Image: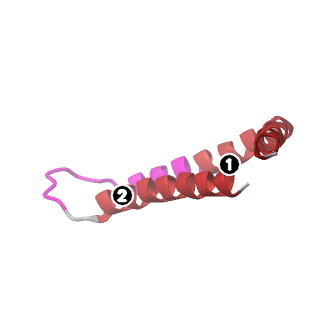
Amino acid sequence: MNSARKISNNIYLVFLSIFLYCIYVTITPKQVYAYVDFGTGSYFLQIVIGVLLGGIVTFKAYKEKIILFIKKIYKGSKREQK
C-alpha cells in the first residue's frame, strides 16, 4: 500500500510541475508583436472551465469502473505481500 501512495504522490508532483511550468510560460513577459483582444481572456477561462467540468462528468460516468480497477490493483498488491 505504501508503494501505491508513492506512485500517486509522484503522479501528483508531475501534474503539479507541468501546471506550474505552463503558468510560468504564460505569465513571464516576452517580446510580442501582436494584438491580444479583450475577449481572449474570457475564451481561455471558458476553455479551463470546460476542461474541468468535462473531467468531472467523465469521472462521474466511469466512477464505478475506476473504483473497481483501483480495488483490483490493491488486492493484487496485498496477495504479492503475503
- Relative height, residue 49 to residue 20 (above, below): above
Which amino acid type is shown beneath numbered disc 1?
Answer: Leu
Q: Residue at x 47, y 50 (%)?
A: 43
Specify the label residue 21 is tagged with.
2
Task: Examine the rendering and report whether any part of residue 9 can be seen.
Answer: yes
Q: Quadrant of residue 70?
A: top right
The nearer-to-camera label among 1 and 2 is: 2
Label 1 Cα neighbours within 10 Å, binned few <14 / some 14-19 / many ≥20: few
Earlier residue among tags 1 and 2: 2
Q: CA distance from mark 1 to mark 2?
A: 22 Å
* Residue 44 counted in the magenta span: yes
Mark identifier at residue 42: none
Q: In the rendered image, is residue 38 in sight?
A: no
Q: Quadrant of residue 82?
A: top right
Task: Indicate the quadrant where residue 76 lies.
Answer: top right
Would residue 41 be found to the left or right of residue 49 on screen?
A: left
Left/right placement of residue 7 relative to residue 14 reads right
Comparing 51 with 75, the one in front is 75
Range of residues picked out in magenta: 30-49
Rendered residue at 67%/42% (across/down): 54
User: Hey, what amino acid is under mark 2?
Assistant: Tyr
Apparent side of residue 42 relative to residue 5 in the rendered image (left or right): left
The residue tagged 1 is: 53
| Dot 2: element | helix
69 or 32: nearer the viewer: 69
Q: Is residue 63 left or right of residue 18?
A: right
Q: Residue 35 placed where, x, y %?
A: 23, 52
Residue 81, x across and y down, in percent: 77, 46
